[in-house]
Each structure stands twice: as C-alpha cells, then as structure tokens.
Image: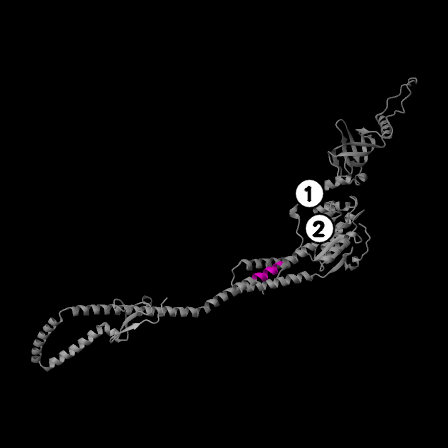
Amino acid sequence: MSTAIKDFESAIAELEQLVKQLEDGDLPLDKSLQLFERGVELSRYCHEQLGAAQKRIEVLTERGELKDGAALLSTDDSTRS
Amino acid sequence: MAKLQGLPFGFDDDPPADAPPPPPEPPLSVAALTARLKSLVESGFSRVEVEGQVSGHRPHASGHLYFSLKDDRSQIRAVMFRTDARRLTFKLEDGQHVVARGRVSVYEVRGEYQLICDRLEPHGQGALQLAFDQLKRRLAAEGLFESVRKRPLPTLPRKIGVVTSQSGAALQDILRVLIARHPSAHIVIRDARVQGEGAAADLTRAIRAITDVAGVDVVIIGRGGGSAEDLWAFNDEGLARAIAASPVPVISAVGHEVDFTIADFVADLRAATPSNAAELVVERADTFRHRIDRAVERLTSAMRRVIDGRHQRVLRTMTRLRSYPTRVVLQQRDCQEFVLRMRHAQLDRVARVGQRFAHLRRRLEARDVRRVTADWRLRLARLDGRLRQTGQTRVQTAEAQSRELAARLHALSPLAVLGRGYAVCWNDARTGIIRSASSVNLGDAVRVTVARGELRCQVTERTDER
C-alpha cells in the first residue's frame, strides 16, 4: 500500500487503531480488506523491526571509538564495584 | 559552649603572691598587651572542639568562610580558610548545628579573638548525609526530580547504552539479562570508575559520551552494592545534571534496592538493581512483541468476522433464492385456488339463476295453463286472421323475429350456461346446490343437472378442499 511507515511506534499505533476500526466498524467489504492488507503490512514491518537489531556488544573507548566488546561477556568475575 | 582541650587556664607569668611588690612598671602599649593576650590565648587554645549553631555566615570571594558559632548565651567569631573550606562535603548554612575543630587566635588589628576552624562536622548526622540532603533539596527545588520530566523508555529499545565499571559484577548482571531475554539487543558499554577519587567526573563524562553515540536510545548507569561511601560518586551534582540533560531516557541502577542516590532521583527511571534495569529494558521489547502479536491476533479475527458475516449473508440470500421456486409454486396454487373460487362463484350464480328459473317455472305451471292457452289460442286465431291478411312476408318476418327472440331467450337462460358444459349438482332432495364436497357424505345420492337432462349420482369418493 501507499502510505510510508514512519517508525515502529507509529506503526504499532496505526496497527492498533486500524484493528479497532475493523472490530467496531460496519465497513464495506473492500474497505475492510484494504484495512486488513494495511494491517498485515504494518505487522510485518513491526516483526521485522523486532529482529532488525543485531545482537552486538560494543565498547565506547575514552577516545570515542567503538570497539567490539564481545570479550566482555567473559565469565571473568572480578568485581571492582 | 566552649569545651576546653589542651591546657586549662593558667597565668604562668603571674608573680607569686608572697613576693614583694615589684617596682612600678611603665604602662603597656596596646600592641604589647594584645601580643601578650595573643600568646596566652593561642597557647592555651591551640586545639579545641566547639559545638554550636552557625550564624551570620557569609562566603567570601577569597573562598574563606566567615561565620559565628553561638549558643543561647554566647557567641564566638569563626573563620575557615579556603584550603580547609574546599574539603567541606556539605554546604555551610546558617542555623546548622555543627561541631567545629580548630584553635583560637587573636586578630591583633581589631583586638578580636576568633575560632580558626580546620574541620566542620554537622552535629548529629554525617557530613555526607547532610551534603546528600542539601543537594537533593536544591535539585528538587530546581524541579529536576519532577515526574513530568521523566521520559518513558523507548517502545522498542534498539541500542542500549551501559555506563558502569567494565570489570564490575553489575555489567555482567546487565549483559546476562539482556542477552538472555532480548537476543537482538545492541549494547554499547562505556567504562567508568564507579567509586573513589574522580569517579563522579568519570561517570559524568561517560554519560555525556554514550548519549552522543548515534542510535543509543536508552542508557543504564549503575554499579553493584557497596557502602554509602562506595556509592558516593552517584550523589554528585555534576553527574545529576548530566543525567538530567541526557537526550535519551536514563535508568539508574545503583547498589541494592534500599540504596537511594541523587542519580536515582534525577534519572527517568530507577531500577532496584543493575539486573533489574536490564529487565526493565527487556520488558519494553517484550511488551512491544506482545502488542504486535495481540494486534495481529485481533486483526485476523476481526477480518474473519467480517468475512464470516459476508458469508452468512451470502448463504442467507442463497437460501432465499433457492426457496423462490417454492414460492412460485405456492403462488401458482394461490392462483389456481382463486380460479377455482371464481368458478365456484360462477356456479353459485348459475345455480341461483337456475333456482329462480325453477321457481318461475313452478309459478308458471301453477297458473291455469288451459286458460292461458285458451287466450293464446284466441289471440292466435285473431292473429292468424291478421297474419293471413298481412301476407306471407310478414309471416316470414315474424318467424325471423321469433327465432331471434328464442335465441335471445336461450342466451339468457341459465340452461345456456349448462349448454357450455357446466353442470349443477344438487342434493338428492333438490333443495340445495352442493358447493362443498364436505357437505355430502360418501354414499349420498346427488342430482346433477346438465344441459340436457339430469343425473342422479352416488358419491363414491370425496376430496375435501383445505
């Protein structure tokens, strides 16, 4: 469908709003189908968003550089705090 | 009340009482007297501790603190020089009940004595506690703890900033929860000292740096449990202001559930522990996931309802369509019935006419037929005479007329109706016309008048109309 999806906040909000409309409205069939298609599109987008962020651990150094921090996940249990 | 430490009063320079009166001395200069008092006071009160209330406090541009200590009976001027004042953890305010440590000195220029403090402690509570209360009150007055300032966590946290000691247990707690429950989480860690000298400044720098990283949409700042002094860096004003200024929501997670720091008050959300902070972030992602699932579920069931509704309508319409032929049949039956009733009505009328005819006939028969015929005969004879006079043509005309009249009469006769093939059915007694099959019984005899003649019939079968 035409309308672009801004972000997942607006996507989920639109999805919920549309579902409500579909639930209470006595809409014509083609309008219902249109809403349903949009709903499917939005939910697909939301699901994509959930999986979009990759599992990653980075460390921000004193000099403002980002370095891989996977090593920090080590079992080393030294406690400085 | 002044509590003396060091030496008690002593006038070592006093001459023994039994000594002979000294020769008169020249009067002392003010400076000399002051100098003697100064040395006396300074040696006698080189180290004292005084408890009293702060009053008349005015900070000086030089950084020295000038104030008085007083109780309900007396007061003493006091000063704390810059180098000592800098180490003060709390802010000196009038009315504070303090314990001052220092020495008493005489300011010769003014001839005044004063207490030179090197340490000030709030009386009854620790300096740290007082400093904490003071900062808390101040920041609260600025509105930094207002709930309207608290921002909600992002709907779906993407890049999660963590500011803590890289080698601390808190980091491991946070990572463990995030990795286990939010597998797609992207975590950015900024190492910072969390206790000791410079920790507050380090944390402040770290929070500024991490909120600058593109995409970081929530920050956890914290450390594991420790003593009040261990957690002290999180009560720093600079850090509090950096947290308040963060462009993204900050979750504080300092120590254990019971520990409250200024950072906790100013943060958008306070977590009881570091792992709890991670859980709060994860819950947002869970909530998001749940919201989508729920919305999709509702979407599909709503659509199913819409389609089911339409399907029902189609089915209903189809049922009605299918029932249409039945209706046609029904209507056809109605039609037939109507026709039948029409026929009956016609028959009734025919019967009624027949009755009248019979009646008339009976009346006719009742008359004196012979007299009538005699009349007719007479008239006929006369007519005959006249006919003969009028000739053959008129006879022919009359004949034609009479034929026509007969035909017209015939047309009017109900018997003509019978001539068209209808029959009239009477009861055996001929007292009534049978209009309903139900008015006769099987075996009854009926009379049927047809165009020519009459039949006496026996009913052998009967079909009742509904």
Q: Position of residue B65 (x, y in %)?
A: 77, 36
Whether labels 2 and 1 belong to a single chain: the reply is yes
Q: Let me know if residue B296 is in the magenta part.
A: yes
**Residue positioned 56% across, 64% down in the render:** A34
Can the viewer see residue B62? no
A59 versus B314 height, above or below:
above
Q: Tell me: B91 left or right of B303.
A: right
The Cα atoms of the two marked residues, 2 and 1, are separated by 18 Å
* Highlighted magenta segment, given as a residue range: B294-302
Residue under label 1, please give it.
Answer: B140
Give the residue at the far bottom of this rendering: B392
Residue under label 2, please give it.
Answer: B251
Image quarter for residue B365?
bottom left
Total labels: the figure holds 2
**Quadrant including the N terminus of chain B:** top right
Q: Position of residue B147 (x, y in %)?
A: 65, 46
Query: Looking at the picture, which amino acid does disc 1 mark?
Result: Ala
Q: Main secondary structure of the magenta part?
A: helix
Chain for numbered disc 2: B
Depth check, front residue: B379 or B123? B379
Q: Tell me: B456 left or right of B89.
A: left
Query: Looking at the picture, which amino acid does disc 2 mark?
Result: Ile
Image quarter for residue A50?
bottom right
Crowd tier of the residue under label 2, counting other residues whose Cα lies within 10 Å: few below 14, some 14–19, many 20 or above: many
Q: Secondary structure at mark 1?
A: helix
**Quadrant including the C terminus of chain B:** bottom left
